[in-house]
Image (cartoon, rainbow, N blue to C red):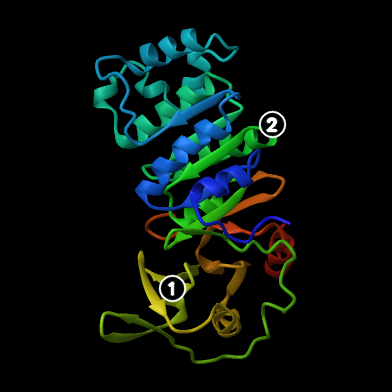
Amino acid sequence: MPATDFNSIEELIAATRGKSIHIECGREAGRRALEEVRNVYGKARVAYYVEGDRGFGRDTVRSYLRFFSALAGGSITAEEAIAHFGLKAVARTRVEKLSPEQRTLMNLARLTLFEPEVVFCERPLAELGVEARHTVLAWMGTESERGTVFVTVCEPLREALLMPGEAWWEDEGRFFPAQIDDAGADESVFAGDEVRICKIQAKTGTSTLFFDPREIDFVESLNRQNFVSVRGELYQTPSTLDELEEELSHFGFFRCHRSYIVNVQKVARVERYTRNSFNLTLSDAAHTSIPLAKGRAEEMRATLGWK
């Protein structure tokens, strides 16, 4: 049985060798993770992307990727990488003129040219919009099923949970696994047609707020605290997730993951990246993506009557 937590990020990476892991952590831990990946996977083909990777400013996207394609000498061409990551429109653009999203996609395209066995990324989803995020998560899902190991650091836990593999989070120098529930929930989601008055309590500073359930996009458990998301802001709530699930299930909410309850009316898209990896994209302003646990996917489909 693996340890339930680790005293250092080095211990975590060594103990999970060969598995994809995604770690919510600080910058210092992220830097140490990079060094430990080099130590643990020294004999494998490893590709790296860190936030400081800016490319060669005066190169175009095409010339930049052609350079690395020649260096890699693999079977994937620069043109294939450009097409896969949606970079055709900026293929002739100089790297220094790219947006943060375009630069991230270019650097991830660079990684694919080396056909790596292991990929280390620092905040791979940080600068991405909805479609770009879909592209990257689909790529990660496909490569993961082919056996590629991903190690990512410094993303928020919500982002870590979206990627294929195990999610971990840091608390005071220790590293804990995010609880993934593959078994599904036992309780019925909708109790009937009864009409109830409900206000969800939350806090901001010294003030206590009361939200109508219809205002809430989702509920999140993060680092042993619970939050409701309203109009793009997170507000801490004193209620437990079990209490919130029981109350909000009467208002069209679904426990999609051990750590998340979603307002089903806000779900715009359900995506499947691997056999065991599902995400929900919401219709809120940020088009937030949250995980759908494998064991709850069929229950959600049956409960909501989705085809």
Indicate the secondary structure of the residue bearing disc 2.
loop
Q: Amino acid at mark 1?
A: Phe
Q: Quadrant of residue 30?
A: top left
174 lies above or below 303: above
Q: Nearer the viewer, residue 46 or 32?
A: 32
Question: Along the line of sight, which residue is nearer the eye, 102 or 220?
Answer: 220
Foreground of the two, 162 or 24: 24
Where is residue 105 shown, x and y percent of the image?
42, 31
Counting the numbered discs, the total is 2
Q: Earlier in the sequence, mark 2 or mark 1?
A: 2
In the rendered image, the quadrant that contains the N terminus is: bottom right
Task: Give the distance between the C-alpha atoms of the residues marked 2 and 1, in whole angstroms.
Answer: 36 Å
Q: Is residue 282 visible?
A: no
Which residue is pictured at 67% across the width and 80% down the height? 190
x, y (%) of residue 223? Answer: 47, 67
Q: Which residue is mark 2?
A: 146
**Residue 112 picture location, percent across and down:** 53, 24
Work out whether 52 lies above or below 6: above
Q: Does 177 sit above or below residue 147? A: below
Q: Which mark is residue 227?
A: 1
